[in-house]
Image (tube, helix red, strand yellow):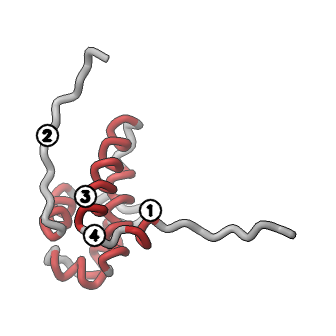
Amino acid sequence: MPIENIPFDAADWLDTPEMVEAFLVESFESAFELDDPGMISEALGVVARAKGMTKMAEDANLSRTALYRALSDQGRPELATIFKVMQALGLRLAPVRVDTAA
């Protein structure tokens, strides 16, 4: 009997503010460690889908089309867009010192 694979979508599990925060913290840290800023827009896109793209666009004071475009696979959101999305989530971007001694 073949094993049925079910696609995993992190958006299905981001149902509390704490889960969203934990997901974004891990995603941002991974983006930094892997030197891949695209992971940030991808993670924000997952959260936007979890919240509902229309609701997220309204909360961030962006058009739904602009939000889709910015957080797509090919998107390169401006810092202002990332800032608006983070504020709409009740989060902020904050610098954290990197331990370079390791």
Q: Earlier in the sequence, mark 4 or mark 1?
A: 4
Q: Give the amino acid at mark 3.
A: Glu
Kind of residue at badge 4: Thr
Q: How far across and how far down the image is residue 18, in percent?
A: 25, 62
Q: Looking at the image, is mark 4 or mark 1 nearer the viewer?
A: 4
Which quadrant would the C terminus be assigned to in this image? top left
User: What distance separates the C-alpha of mark 1 from that of mark 2?
Assistant: 25 Å
- Residue for point 21% across, 60% down: 82
Q: Mark 2 points at which residue?
A: 95
Q: Earlier in the sequence, mark 1 or mark 2?
A: 1
Instruction: Report the amino acid beneath label 1.
Output: Asp
Q: In this view, does 91 lie to the left or right of 53?
A: left
Query: Comparing marks 3 and 4, which lies closer to the viewer?
Result: 4
Q: Distance between the residues labelled 1 and 3?
A: 21 Å
What quarter of the picture does the N terminus occupy?
bottom right
| Kind of element beneath mark 1 | loop
Task: Pick out the residue farthest to the top.
Answer: 101
Left or right relative to 19: residue 34:
right
SS label for mark 4: loop
**Residue pointed to by mark 4:** 16
Q: Quadrant of residue 52?
A: bottom left
Callout in the foreground (1, 2): 2
Q: Which residue is drawn at 38% across and 51% down?
A: 39
Q: How crowded is mark 1: few (under 14 residues within 10 Å), some or many (20 or more)?
A: few
The answer for how far apart the CA atoms under marks 4 and 2 are is 24 Å
Q: First in sequence, mark 3 or 2: give its number.
A: 3
Q: Which mark is residue 73?
A: 1
Label 3 SS: helix
Give the residue pinned by disc 3: 21
**Residue type indicated by callout 2:** Pro
Q: Earlier in the sequence, mark 3 or mark 4?
A: 4
In front: 51, or 38?
Answer: 51
